[in-house]
């Protein structure tokens, strides 16, 4: 069995083993979950090392060595996995968050421990599945595998005040978004089947992304089809990001979830939408992406500014970070909309950095909430007196989120802004810079109000994180943020190599998006330095004669 498949199998196998472990054997249950997370962390680090030493060529060679395993051959469902630079970053992210979240859960969860870790491991397996599969059916299935456990984790172990409402709202929004995306997936599926039958009338249908991309590259997908399909894919996956105005499920989900649930929610679950847009929508619908992405850049501004101002008005510390996360996902959307290698690589790097930072932040909030049972900021204050280690870690997380140089978040946000400026989104880039100021205001205020006001005697019984077991998850996440912040080049090079093939077809498409009224060619964002391959419509297209005729017909 290949290592990529093991990323899914190990958590599921551990969850299956826990089914037969007596519920009273809580220590064995905790260590089984931590052991499974440790194995997947080791695999994630191995793939990062492979990409670091062998580059994209090593990842491509590894992927090529993996077979397609027929699952339901009559409808074209196959188990096929693969990896590139973008996948490496997301696999490493999920490995880090899953491992540290299991460590946090080991001392935070005291009720129904067996059921909790079974669901938590299933959640981790679902996220891994989205990041590694190349079959659109299994990508959809893996996403649903992640959503169902999250519903139960929030509903059973979340904050008693609003967990039922939060669990239901999160599930309804994510399921509705997934169903909208499913429409786009099915459109691609049937259109690809038509393409395959051109050369072989008896060809079987296929959900495999390689077949979908081959049909797109041939020019078989018309411009109108791509524009329509991209809308379904973007809106469906955009609800998962979460994209304004489909974001309202996310902050309440953060607030109600248990600490480790919030770590997985903000750390990796919110990244699935952006990843799917880049993995599926960009290569399958490059002309649709080129047509709609200017609107995406506008929506990104709503995420950044609206999310920031709403975060500023919150009095619940978890809601502050929840709305902050929605705001930061606006930077990811802006980087994606830029369709520059710099901007999109920055967006993927920000997904990684933000995932690590929010996992750290929610883990720390959960640590003191489990003792205070209070997240209302005016009731807190001066906690650094009782919890100096937690307070120091929270201050570092705040600096990372605010984009202080030296942390990975700074490098990634800078790349997004430079990419947006390069693509011609200069107003949006300036607004994004202003968004950093807003972020600093509400985060520094929250830090001061929670940890650095006058000491309150009512909190004198609080206990700080002690010993390596309690402190190591937070230290690990801080070290990762600082390591990739001080020296981001290895991660950026890995991500860039994976992003370039994804961005290239959209950038080509931008070179022949013609204004039907003026006949002008919109060349914004076309990068003449990208292998020198710019299609202006004056030379035969590499995308096939059918698409060439379509352009000439315009």
Image (tube, rainbow, N blue to C red):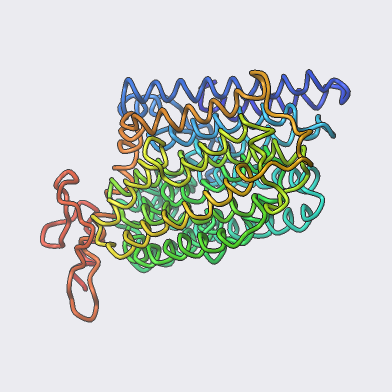
Q: In this picture, is 224 found above or below 73?
A: below
- Residue that extends furthest to the front in the rendered view of this protein: 454
Q: In this picture, is 264 found above or below 520?
A: above
Q: In this picture, is 483 found above or below 301?
A: above
Relative image position of residue 432 (x, y in whole percent)? 37, 58
Q: Is residue 388 found left or right of 279 in the rendered image? A: right
Q: Residue at the spot x=62%, y=35% of the render?
A: 124
Q: Nearer the viewer, residue 192 or 133?
A: 133
Q: Residue at the spot x=42%, y=25% of the render?
A: 48
- Residue that extends furthest to the bottom in the rendered view of this protein: 517
Q: Which of 192 and 444 is in front in this view?
A: 444
Q: Residue at the spot x=67%, y=46% of the render?
A: 381
Q: In which quarter of the image is the C terminus?
A: bottom left
Relative image position of residue 504 (x, y in whole percent)? 27, 48
Q: Which of 427 and 446 is in front in this view?
A: 446
Q: In which quarter of the image is the N terminus?
A: top right
Q: Is residue 375 found left or right of 547 in the rendered image? A: right
Q: What is the number of callouts on the image?
A: 0
Relative image position of residue 351 (x, y in whole percent)? 46, 43
Relative image position of residue 523 (x, y in whole percent)? 19, 63
- Residue that extends furthest to the left in the rendered view of this protein: 538
Q: Is residue 30 found left or right of 520 in the rendered image? A: right
Q: Residue at the spot x=49%, y=55% of the render?
A: 441
């Amino acid at each position: 069995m290949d290592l990529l498949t093991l990323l899914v199998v190990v958590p599921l196998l551990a969850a299956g083993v826990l089914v037969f472990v007596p519920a009273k054997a809580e220590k064995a249950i905790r260590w089984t979950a931590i052991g499974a997370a440790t194995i997947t962390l080791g695999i994630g680090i191995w793939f990062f090392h492979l990409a670091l030493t062998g580059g994209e060529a090593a990842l491509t060679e590894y992927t090529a060595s993996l077979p397609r395993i027929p699952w339901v051959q009559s409808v074209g469902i196959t188990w096929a996995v693969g990896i590139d630079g973008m996948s490496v970053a997301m696999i490493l992210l999920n490995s880090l968050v899953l491992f540290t979240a299991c460590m946090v859960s080991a001392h935070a969860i005291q009720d129904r421990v067996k059921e909790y870790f079974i669901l938590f491991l299933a959640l981790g397996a679902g996220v891994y599945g989205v990041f590694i599969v190349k079959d659109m059916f299994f990508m959809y299935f893996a996403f649903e595998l992640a959503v169902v456990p999250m519903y139960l984790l929030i509903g059973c172990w979340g904050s008693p005040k609003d967990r039922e409402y939060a669990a239901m709202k999160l599930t309804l929004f994510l399921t509705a978004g997934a169903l909208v995306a499913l429409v786009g997936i099915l459109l691609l599926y049937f259109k690809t089947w038509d393409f395959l039958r051109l050369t072989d009338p008896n060809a079987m249908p296929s959900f495999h992304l390689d077949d979908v991309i081959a049909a797109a590259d041939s020019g078989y997908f018309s411009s109108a089809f791509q524009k329509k399909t991209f809308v379904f894919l973007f809106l469906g996956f955009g609800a998962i990001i979460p994209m304004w105005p489909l974001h309202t499920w996310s902050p309440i989900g953060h607030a109600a979830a248990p600490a480790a649930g919030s770590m997985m929610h903000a750390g990796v679950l919110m990244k699935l939408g952006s990843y799917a847009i880049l993995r599926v929508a960009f290569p399958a619908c490059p002309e649709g992406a080129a047509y709609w992405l200017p609107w995406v850049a506008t929506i990104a501004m709503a995420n950044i500014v609206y999310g920031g101002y709403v975060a500023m008005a919150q009095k619940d510390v978890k809601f502050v970070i929840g709305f902050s996360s929605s705001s930061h996902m606006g930077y990811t959307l802006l980087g994606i909309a830029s369709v520059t290698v710099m901007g999109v690589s920055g967006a993927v790097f920000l997904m990684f950095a933000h995932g690590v930072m929010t996992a750290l932040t929610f883990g720390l909030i959960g640590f003191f909430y489990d003792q205070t049972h209070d997240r209302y900021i005016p009731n807190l204050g001066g906690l650094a007196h009782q919890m100096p280690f937690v307070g120091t870690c929270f201050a570092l997380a705040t600096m990372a989120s605010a984009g202080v140089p030296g942390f990975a978040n700074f490098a990634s946000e800078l790349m997004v802004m430079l990419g947006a400026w390069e693509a011609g989104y200069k107003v949006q880039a300036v607004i994004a810079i202003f968004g950093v100021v807003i972020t600093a205001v509400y985060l520094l205020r929250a830090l001061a109000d929670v940890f650095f006001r006058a000491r309150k005697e009512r909190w004198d019984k609080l206990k700080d994180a002690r010993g390596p077991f309690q402190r190591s998850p937070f230290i690990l996440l801080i070290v990762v943020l600082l390591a990739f912040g001080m020296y981001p080049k290895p991660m950026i090079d890995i991500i860039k190599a994976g992003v370039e093939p994804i961005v290239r077809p959209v950038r080509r498409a931008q070179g022949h998006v013609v204004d039907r009224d003026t006949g002008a060619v919109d060349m914004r964002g076309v990068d003449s330095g990208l292998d020198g391959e710019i299609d202006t419509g004056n030379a035969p297209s590499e995308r096939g004669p059918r698409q060439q005729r379509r352009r000439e017909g315009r």
